[in-house]
Image (tube, grey):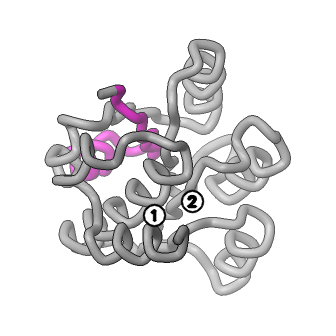
Amino acid sequence: MEKVHIICIDDQREVLAAVQKDLALFEPIAEIIECESAEEAEEVLEDLFAEEKPVAMIISDHIMPDENGVEFLARLQKDDRFKNVASILLTGLATHQDTIEAINKARITHYIEKPWKAEDLQNKIKIILTRFILSTGRNYTEYQDFLDQDTLVEELRNRV
C-alpha cells in the first residue's frame, strides 16, 4: 500500500504538534508533513509532485506571515496539478469575509475553528481520505480501517 500525504501548515509549532497528535492514528496509511509557512508547503508540494507522490489534503492555518492560508490555497486552486488536493482551513481568527473568500476563491473542503475537537478533525479527515482513495483508483480495502464507512458505502453506491 502506498501512503498518501497530508500537509499541515501553521506558523506556530505547538499547533502543528497538536494537529500531528490528532492525526497520529492515520500514520499507517498517511505521511503527515509539517510546514511552518506557505512557502515551505509549496516546496514540499513541488517535491511530492515531481516524485509522483499522492497528496490527499492540505490543512492550513489562515493567519500566517507573508502569505495567509486563504491566499495560498486559492493560488493552489489555479494550478491544475493541485486542483484535486482537498483543503481544510483551520483557524481561530478569520473574519466573515475571510470565510467567504476561503469558500469562493480557495474552494476549501472544510472550515474548522480553533480550538477544535480531535474527533471532529479526525472524522473530516476520514471523509476526505475516503473520497481521495476512491477518486484516485486505489484499492480501498487496503485503507478500509481508516476510511469513513458511511462515505465509502455512499460513494460506491453512486458508482453503480
**Circle 2 — which element?**
loop
Residue type at tag 2: His
**Quarter residue 98 falls in:** bottom right
Q: Residues within 10 Å of mark 1 (few under 14, many from 20)?
A: many
Q: Is residue 112 magenta?
A: no
Looking at numbered disc 1 in the image, what kind of residue is underneath it?
Leu
Identify the residue at image location x=47%, y=67%. Answer: 91
Instruction: Please rate how many residues cluster around mark 2, counting C-alpha atoms within 10 Å: few if below 14, some from 14 to 19, many from 20.
Output: many
> Which residue is label 2 attached to?
62
Q: Is residue 59 visible?
A: no
Tell me the quarter of the image containing the N terminus: top left
Q: Is residue 27 left or right of residue 65?
A: left
* Relative horizontal placement of residue 9, taking residue 49 as reference (left or right): left
Q: CA distance from mark 1 to mark 2?
A: 7 Å
Q: Which region shows up in magenta?
A: 2-20
Task: First in sequence, mark 1 or 2: give its number.
Answer: 2
| 16 in relation to 106, above or below | above
Give the residue pinned by disc 1.
90
Is label 1 in contact with label 2 (beta carbons under 8 Å)?
A: yes
Q: Which mark is residue 55?
A: none
Residue at image position (54%, 44%) is 136
92 to 48, vertically: above or below:
below
Q: Nearer the viewer, residue 60 or 65?
A: 60
Q: Position of residue 51 (x, y in %)?
A: 57, 13
Q: What residue sits 56% from the left and 32% below the top?
A: 41
Q: Is residue 19 magenta?
A: yes
